[in-house]
Image (spheres, coloured by chain):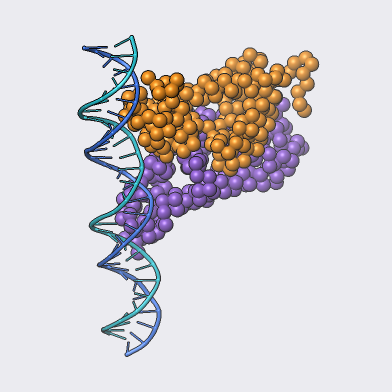
Chain colours: A purple, B orange, C blue, D cyan
Amino acid sequence: MARSGIPTRERIITAANSLFYNDGIRGVSVDAVAAKAGVTKRTLYYHFRSKDELVAAYLAGRDQPNLALFRQWFSEADDGLPAQVERIFRNLARSARHPKWKGCGFLRTSAELANLPGHPAIKIGAAHKKKFEAWLRETFAEAGIAQAAQLARQILLLLDGSFAVVLLHRDPSYMETAGEAAHALIEAALPVQAGVRRKR
Amino acid sequence: MARSGIPTRERIITAANSLFYNDGIRGVSVDAVAAKAGVTKRTLYYHFRSKDELVAAYLAGRDQPNLALFRQWFSEADDGLPAQVERIFRNLARSARHPKWKGCGFLRTSAELANLPGHPAIKIGAAHKKKFEAWLRETFAEAGIAQAAQLARQILLLLDGSFAVVLLHRDPSYMETAGEAAHALIEAALPVQAGVRRKR
DNA sequence: GTATGTATACTGCCCAGTGAATATACACAA
DNA sequence: TTGTGTATATTCACTGGGCAGTATACATAC
């Protein structure tokens, strides 16, 4: 059992999360994760078969919280689809200003492990992004947008593009630009309704 | 001097290019690069002060060829700005279908080395993307687009987003979706001209 | 005979994963 | 209540290999 109230396995994942997100997968040794979790390496290998499995668990632990955050930002106000989606980008830009921000853990992992296409962590990352895309698609479809699937992909591309670009330039304003582009694309796809005036 | 006609330094960079692009920076040892170049490690260290410097040289060697390729695809036909830019995405999608394709070397390096913000390789990557953005901006400005700077950023976001997403899902069709979004955004920003009918 | 370029052989360190033993918890029989 | 077996959880110490970078010496060219 765990030393403190928190189970060992969970403590290891928390340590892995912080280290892998900060320094990348190959930049962090299993020893470092074990040390940060206050556990010997042998104990870590009792809970995880290999480093690869630990990496997968790290990403799996980020899946739901991330999606929940996006949904929360979206739902903070009911001010119309373009504004609601743009708010996701604005909140992300705010996060990106924190000095410890280092982009999207899923994308960075897939970039680092690009030579291992079947890696379990990459599958988890792909599933995560598919869930986000599906949520957007359903949201757009419910709003009566005909090309909901295509639009959802376009928003996803802007989102992941801003992760990559902001990480490279360390300039979160790109995320606001992406939000504006998303706003414009959604606005243009929205069906005209009584009482709702479309731009231009 | 070099064993063959090609200078040693160049052979090393060629070897580094192939290995780093395929397996990532931390996934490739200096020994491996030296071996692939047909040179001992000591010789490699005669030409490059450190692995970091070698990584920077690897990316510097991709800068101009990449930009030239984009410009070439753009100029293949003079069929209007939206189509010309969309052609870049279509050609990229074609490249992405090759099994050895592994995304954008600049973005993958910046993702892998995100914990070393001042790394020379990251600076080279950032400069490369800035050059591309500037080229787009100037092209748009020459076409009389008022918000040329903002539009250039949006296209860049779509491009880099498609690099990231296609790498994750191994589905190049996202690049075509990005091209369509770029087409729509440029079309919407283009000034109305005599004889040119805008969509919708 | 000095600049450049290349090679052999080495140092010190880090790293993923393992062998063998120990400790704790709990079920159940005496 | 106490003894005992079994599954879970954890530790220490280790292996075999890889890695970035270097000390030293040799070769070639002008």
Toward the viewer: B11 or B197? B11
At 59% across and 23% down in the image, what residue appears? B70
- Residue at x 46%, y 34% (from the top left corner): B19
In the rendered image, residue A177, in percent from the top left (x then y), is placed at 56, 29
Q: Quadrant of the C terminus of chain B?
A: top right
Residue C2 placement: quadrant: top left
Q: Quadrant of residue B141?
A: top right
Q: Position of residue C24 (x, y in %)?
A: 30, 69
Count of marks placed on residues: 0
Question: In the displayed structure, does residue C17 sit left or right of residue B196?
Answer: left
Q: Is residue A134 left or right of residue B117?
A: right
Give the residue displayed 56% in from the left and 39% down from the top. B167
Q: Is residue B54 left or right of residue B131?
A: left
Residue C27 percent across, percent down from the top left: 40, 79
**Where is A3 relative to A178, above or below?**
below
Say whether residue A195 is visible.
no
In the image, is residue A51 above or below residue B140? Answer: below
- Residue plotted at (49% across, 30% down): B106
Residue B178 x %, y %? 64, 33
Q: Quadrant of the N terminus of chain B?
A: top left
Q: Looking at the image, which is closer to me, A195 or B156?
A: B156
Q: Judge whether residue B18 can be spotted in this image.
A: yes
